[in-house]
Image (cartoon, grey):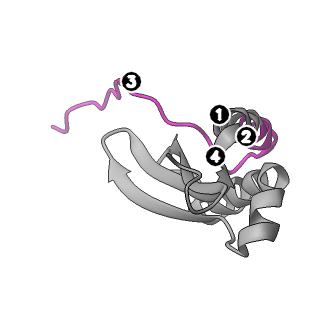
Amino acid sequence: NYTFQTNFILDEVPVLVTYESDIEEATQLLIEAARAHANIAIKETGEEPYVRAELADSGIRLRLRYQTLATDRQRISSAIVFEIVKKFDRSDKVEFAYPHTEVIYRPKEA
């Protein structure tokens, strides 16, 4: 029972960005997205969204963590995801990472 002591829970949206991405800008964009959609929880709890990071095979996994209304968690999470996609599309410094293979041909030195 999530709402036994409070109406809010800690939620998380994981996002994988390329190693070439500007991590500071990605972090800022994630926090902006959370502030836009979890503003009720931020006002009520006084807890700002934050980002944690970890290395992954295909990029850097950023975990956007924020307080949200337990009863609206999925709706708010989805709104944040859509907001993140829009923000990343407008940025030329941040790209989503995905598993893929890149072949680079280099001639052998004599």
For label 1, the crowd category at 10 Å Cα-Cα, with few meaning under 14, some 14 to 19 and many 20 or more, is few
Of the pair 108 and 100, the residue shown nearer to us: 100
Residue 61, numbered circle: none
Q: Earlier in the sequence, mark 2 or mark 4?
A: 4
Q: Position of residue 29 (x, y in %)?
A: 73, 55
Residue at x 38%, y 26% (from the top left corner): 102
For label 2, the crowd category at 10 Å Cα-Cα, with few meaning under 14, some 14 to 19 and many 20 or more, is some
The residue indicated by pointer 3 is 100
Residues shaded magenta:
83-110
Q: Earlier in the sequence, mark 3 or mark 2?
A: 2
Q: Is residue 64 visible?
A: yes
Amino acid type of the residue tagged 1 in the rendering: Gln
Q: Is residue 101 above or below residue 43?
A: above
The residue indicated by pointer 1 is 74
The residue indicated by pointer 2 is 76
The residue indicated by pointer 4 is 70
Distance of mark 3 from mark 2, alpha carbons? 30 Å
Query: Which quadrant of the figure contains the C terminus?
Result: top left
Which-is-in-front pick, marks 2 and 4? 4
Disc 1 and disc 2 in contact, CB within 8 angstroms: yes
Looking at the rendered structure, the number of numbered marks drawn on it comes to 4
Amino acid type of the residue tagged 4 in the rendering: Ala
Q: Is residue 36 above or below residue 101?
A: below
Which-is-in-front pick, marks 3 and 4? 4
Q: Position of residue 91 (x, y in %)?
A: 77, 46
